[in-house]
Image (spheres, rainbow, N blue to C red):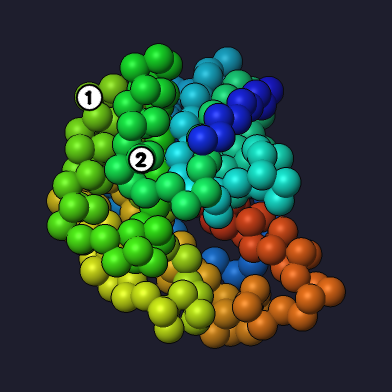
Amino acid sequence: MIRARLLVAALLAAPLPVFAADMPPALPCDVPADLVAWPHGFAHIGAGLQPGGRLDVLAIGSGTLLGPRGGVDGSVPDHMIEALHAAAPGATLHLTLHGARAATAAEMLVALRKELAAHTYQLVLWQTGTVEAVRKLPPEQFAGTLGEGAVAVAGAGAGLVLVDVPYSRLLESNSDLAPYRAVMEQLAAHGDAALFRRYDLMRHWADSGELDLESANRRDRNNTAERLRACLGQALAKFVLGK
């Protein structure tokens, strides 16, 4: 069973057990194993994916986290939940999606703390960094905000997955993404969060010609964007499942 709610301004140790259907559906894009590998596992979610278990996921981020109509349906976390449900059909999965266009990490942190105080989650997805890069906000301020968020998530007994910035030639031509990517990589290296490498995945697909939203013609752009969300969502499920 899958349940979801939308709020708009909707762990790390052992590997997961093997389930009867222990793989998400076939990925709609090529996903190199090294780009979705997280060797530490997600101990917080194991029980939630067992038959009769319950997994509550909080996804928080800016506009790219939302679905095509600005809601849960068709969003990256929604595709992730569908793939997790296929891997663990006997579990109840609940997704809360909190997305706000042009939101900074500092603004997301306020919403994150409110959600953690009001509800119990086993897994938190935090997509951030793009707005900071575009606005050229201080990377050290960004690092402090993410650190505070990681402490809050750990204190709530949940696992944290950071979703880094998207790959975009236009974005890179106008913004310096490297300092913000480095902040997220450092947090993950210290064991405070897992890092889902959205940037590297999207660059791999664009470079291979498999999936490149920026080069898609106008007629195909919506379908390409939909496929991109599906690819990222199922890759996230693969990342969390460790498969």
x, y percentage for residue 230? Answer: 66, 55
Q: Is residue 37 left or right of residue 139?
A: right
Which residue sits at x=53%, y=18%?
A: 53
Which residue sits at x=57%, y=76%?
A: 205
**Circle 2 — which element?**
helix
Mark 2 and mark 1 lie on one chain; the one further toward the N terminus is: 2
Q: Is residue 160 above or below residue 135?
A: above
Q: Is residue 8 above or below residue 187?
A: above
Question: What amino acid is at disc 1?
Answer: Gly
x, y percentage for residue 79? Answer: 64, 45
Which residue sits at x=39%, y=31%?
A: 111
- Within-10-Å neighbours for mark 1: few <14, some 14–19, many 20+: few
Q: Which residue is mark 1?
A: 155
Residue 224 falls in which quadrant of the image? bottom right
What mark, if any, has residue 163 been given in the picture?
none
x, y percentage for residue 164? Answer: 39, 59
Q: Which residue is mark 2?
A: 107
